[in-house]
Image: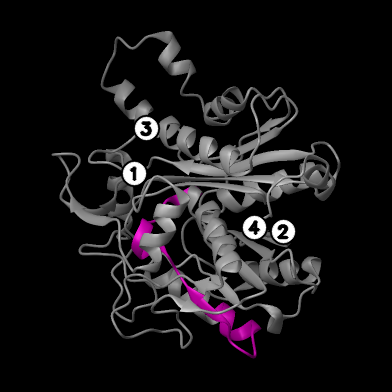
């Protein structure tokens, strides 16, 4: 990974987001963006719910500049996912019966990825995966496969979400999943999730491509990944851990890693009763020596499909800077014994990023420092 771009409720650049995260800041606030719905804690990038393409454009521009790449990039692949895509626009159009043809066409499911390709002037392959909350990790690994197979020398990957809409809020409300005061991952008395907006974009490059152009020092490398599906329930994780355990085991196997080599885990950590309990039981069952772990959703909110890509960027920054990000929203008690409660210096060599989505979609991505051997 040679470039990163971040847009979150903590800031509209990777540096600002990272600095505020390490300081324990949160982008969550009690808001009522829609008068027909009760106030809820949400993480907005601005003062009002924003547009998907605006978030994505900023993140793509930052990642390309960070990788020191000139424009155009005609041969660069693009893999940008979103679990909700342009849902906010669709909801607006249902209230405007005289909407025109062009706005509808620009709001098709894959048009965020197309917008990114236009931005960098790419004529390479474009993919737009949707895998619920595992979308971000799915996009990153699809981009990795394009490079690994030699189809592309470099790929822009990531995910974006603008989920603060009446339907999304009402849906999670009906599920009983929304927090009322804040997001407190792994707290014994956690309330639920808090929705957030954001985007994360990364530039993946082959080692040969980077050497030929004399690019910047990479943030890290992809060691491997594991994906699975529970085939259990529409929203609840499998209590037997079968799917998530398979994803974790496959990630470690294909990465050539042993559990004790993992220094940090960026958890999915939604702050819901079922997810957090599931993750803790998974880690405790598969790691004899528990690694440090934290969730950053108490700071950024739950960005749904973008959350895995945002988590992957946080993992890369933790590996580069030797600092583990805190579990923002910690209230002094935890169901996991090695929770990172404040930013701590630790030179981890390997980090795992976990994502678990509706429908039992599980993803685990292994990232490593580029100056180490495993």
Q: Which mark is residue 222?
A: 2
Q: Which residue is drawn at 50% across and 48% down?
A: 305
User: Where residue 146 sits: x, y (%)?
Assistant: 78, 41
Q: Residue 206 carries which label?
A: none
Q: Residue at x 62, y 60 (%)?
A: 363
Of discs 2 and 4, which sits in the foreground? Answer: 4
**Is residue 26 highlighted in magenta?**
no
* SS at circle 4: loop
Gap between marks 2 and 4 measured at Cα: 10 Å
Graded by Cα atoms within 10 Å as few (under 14), some (14 to 19) or many (20 or more), the crowding at tag 2 reads: some
Frontmost residue, 70 versus 329 = 70
Of discs 3 and 4, which sits in the foreground? Answer: 4
* SS at circle 3: loop
Frontmost residue, 373 versus 125 = 373
User: Where residue 223 sits: x, y (%)?
Assistant: 75, 63
Bounds of the magenta segment: 282-305
Gap between marks 3 and 4 measured at Cα: 29 Å
């Amino acid at each position: 990974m040679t470039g990163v771009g971040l847009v979150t409720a903590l800031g509209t650049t990777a540096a600002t987001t990272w600095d505020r995260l390490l300081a324990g800041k949160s982008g969550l606030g009690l808001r009522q963006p829609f008068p027909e719905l009760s106030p809820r804690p949400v993480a907005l990038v601005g003062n009002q719910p924003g547009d998907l393409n605006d978030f994505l454009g900023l993140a793509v521009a930052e990642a390309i500049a960070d990788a020191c790449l000139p424009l155009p990039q005609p041969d660069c692949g693009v893999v940008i996912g979103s679990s909700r895509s342009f849902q906010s626009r669709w909801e607006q159009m249902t209230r405007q019966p005289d909407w025109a043809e062009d706005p509808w066409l620009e709001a098709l499911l894959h048009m965020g990825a197309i917008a990114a390709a236009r931005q960098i002037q790419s004529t390479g392959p474009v993919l737009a995966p949707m895998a619920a909350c595992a979308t971000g990790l799915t996009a990153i690994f699809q981009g990795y496969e394009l490079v690994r197979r030699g189809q592309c020398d470099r790929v822009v990957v990531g995910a974006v979400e603008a989920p603060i809409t009446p339907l999304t809020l009402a849906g999670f409300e009906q599920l009983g999943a929304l927090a009322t005061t804040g997001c407190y991952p792994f707290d014994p008395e956690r309330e639920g999730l808090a929705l957030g907006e954001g985007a994360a974009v990364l530039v993946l490059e082959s080692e040969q491509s980077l050497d030929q152009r004399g690019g910047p020092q990479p943030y890290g490398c992809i060691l491997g990944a594991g994906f699975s599906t529970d085939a259990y329930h529409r929203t609840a994780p499998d209590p037997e851990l079968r799917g998530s355990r398979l994803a974790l085991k496959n990630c470690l196997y294909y990465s050539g890693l042993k559990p004790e080599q993992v220094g940090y885990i960026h958890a999915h950590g939604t702050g819901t009763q079922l997810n957090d309990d599931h993750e803790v039981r998974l880690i405790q069952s598969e790691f004899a020596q528990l690694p440090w772990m934290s969730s950053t959703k108490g700071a950024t909110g739950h960005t749904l499909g973008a959350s895995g890509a945002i988590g992957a960027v946080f993992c890369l920054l933790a590996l580069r800077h030797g600092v583990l990000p805190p579990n923002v929203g910690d209230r002094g008690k935890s169901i996991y014994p090695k929770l990172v409660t404040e930013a701590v210096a630790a030179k981890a060599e390997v980090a795992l990023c976990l994502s678990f989505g509706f429908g039992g979609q599980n993803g685990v991505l292994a990232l490593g420092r580029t100056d180490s051997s495993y």
